[in-house]
Amino acid sequence: MSKRAFELPVLTQPAPVDHAAAAADFNADVARTDWHDASLWFVRERRDRAAALVPDWEELRVRASAIKEHALTHLDDYLTQFEAHALENGMNVHWARDAEEHNRIVHGILEKAGARRLVKSKSMLTEECGLNKYLGARGIDVVDSDLGERIVQLRGEGPSHIVLPAIHLKRGEVGETFHEHLGTPLGLDDPVALTLAAREHLRGKFLAADATLTGMNFAIAESGGFVVCTNEGNADLGMSLAPIHIASVGIEKVIPRLEDLPVFLRLLARSGTGQAITSYTTHVHGPRDGQELHVILVDNGRTRQLAREEFWGSLKCIRCGACMNTCPVYRRSGGHSYGSTVPGPIGSVLTPGLDLERYASLPFASTLCGSCTAVCPVKIDLDGQLFRWRQHVTERGYSSKAKGAAIKASVVMFDRPRLFRVAGAIARLGLRLMPSAVARIASGAWGRTREAPLPGRESFRSWYRRERSGGKR
Amino acid sequence: MTSSTARDEILRAVRAALPPAVDAPPAEYQPGTPSASDEDLVVRFTHAAVASGALVVASEGDPAVDAMQIAGSAPEVLSLLPGVASTIAMPTNPHALATLDLFLCQAAVGVAENGALWFATPDPIHRAALYLAERVVIVIAADALVADLHEAYRRINVRATSFGTFVAGPSKTADIEQSLVVGAHGPKELTVIISTARG
């Protein structure tokens, strides 16, 4: 049996991501798919309960969205303010145009200090930049310290969710991984025992680290500080112990004022996991005595997204993961099927901006039901953006030929009422006469896992005319 | 160090990309948190702290007495509480706290809506102790409780220290099959002592 639940798309491979095909692989294991679906729905329901307890929830969302829109439309001001105040606070500030430059800066800092052991806490940005691979090739021992991230790192996978990195794995699989890498007893699959084994293993890594790297949830322009939220306290252990702290952040994470923080913090954990707040919400306004603190401000495609009139609103994202937990497609296709660092609805509007041809299938990994937009704490119109990306994909000819042909054929039919009526009559009769196995093929992907209902004996049109002529309403 | 080319290029790209300006919302925000008496705040805070996984103790007398009871005979104790003695000498290096059993401290503000406690310090040893200790005890005065996070930020001066954190419950994770496990990396137990004594 393969140890992996399913094969990962290789991120460096330029071949286009085929979300539907990857999702079909995930769906091959029906029990796992149902379990994955239910696990995430459980988190979504926790979010609903937490949100319902906040009387000004909708006002908070409106305000959070307005603050982010204001910040993004004055981003140059706020970035330079943040930089100036961070420098005053004793931080070093670096700027990176792309992933390669970011990785080079990190490596340069480590090399200069002779640091070989780096402990990271969760940073989707460094996943996006491929930092672990870059540093690994240069002899740096990189350890992800978030439990979920450590699990997937040991397995040679990427995270499948931005908040719950190992949500695709069952406890038995984690047990096998820990048996192999941490020497836990074979067959041990109790989450408490496994977590404590990871604690012991990682405590040693924290104490031995030469440097630590964290992300940032918020960078504050007026104070030159930043906030890191975790439940595990892993970022804090890293920051409190290592002599060098590197904090990497996408340029869109800058917010103007300290008083904006409570607006976002009241939304973030409630939206993400249904907690009122994470265990630790840490504010850093300078290095501790004797520590070196480096901030890296990273563009890597963000200014290109900012320039897109239809899509710049996606940069409001605070990475809570609520859109993933609620998305019926994400829940039943798994994060890896998106072939993108950030999966789910938000990933499907961010990642096409990096390479539309390669990620052309992502905007179609949605039913456009709008549930993502309804739960988004910063009111990103996710379904609208997904819909608009579809127009760009089709205009540039990146959508599948078969889909294009089917749409063209239906345009011909809908343009000609007589043809439409004839086609309808044929379909009504044909679907009744066809064996259901054939009918299921005829109904396309939808019919693969569903029994097609029998069509009505007459068309709506003829029913309506008959009813009207009978004088009834 | 900082490449001024990268900085200038990024800022130039940002300026070229800026969408039409959106005004900042007015500074004052009315949170809509229901008003509360002092007693309400204690009740609300207690509910939220318990939900975050903390143990909550009410102390009507000297909180040091309750704290010492919780400490029991823990061998390695670091205390910032008046009336509770440390059993170890203050180390010069935070790594020396790797086997710390108990850390006791006082929070400046407690937040009723989420059970979070504000602890800020410029001292790197105290900071590390909050995460390295097996168990943590935090004392909060009942009159230092506020209704919501907006009010909390009005009471604290975030910029005053290089480090400050809201602590809500012990270290925890649910990364294996959504099963909540306490003590992921940091403290396995957090006890909050709400001190109602009038100073």
Image (cartoon, grey):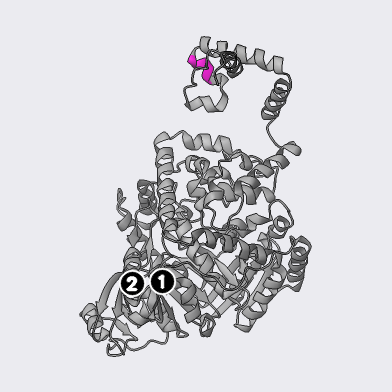
Front-most of A413 and A188? A413
Q: Could you tell me the amino acid type at mark 2?
A: Asp
Which residue is identified by label 1? B35
SS label for mark 2: helix
Residue A137 visible from this viewpoint: no
Which of the 4 image quarters holds residue A391?
Answer: top right
Q: Chain of mark 2?
A: B
Q: Is residue B157 positioned above or below B20 on the image?
A: below
Q: Is residue A178 magenta?
A: no
Compared across the picture, whether B24 is left or right of B34 comes to: right
**How far from the left and from the top, in percent, is residue B65?**
22, 85
Category of crowding for the residue at label 2, using alpha-carbon neighbours closer than 10 angstroms: few (below 14), some (14–19), many (at least 20): few
Which stretch appears magenta?
Answer: A436-440
Q: Amino acid at mark 1?
A: Ser
Identify the residue shown where x is 53% and y is 46%: A371
As drawn, is A50 to the left or to the right of A193?
right
Spatial CA span between label 2 and label 1: 9 Å
Callout 2–callout 1 Cβ contact below 8 Å? no
Same-chain check, marks 2 and 1: yes
**Left or right for B184, reference A336:** left
Residue B167, image x and y in percent?
A: 40, 72
Main secondary-structure element of the magenta-colored stretch: helix
Residue annotated with mark 2:
B40
Position above or below: B52 against B159: above
A353 lies left or right of A460: right
- Subunit under mark 1: B
Q: Quadrant of the N terminus of chain A?
A: top left
- Please, what secondary structure does the residue beneath circle 1 have? loop
Confirm whether residue A473 shows in the render. Answer: yes
x and y percentages locating residue A89 in the rendered image: 60, 82
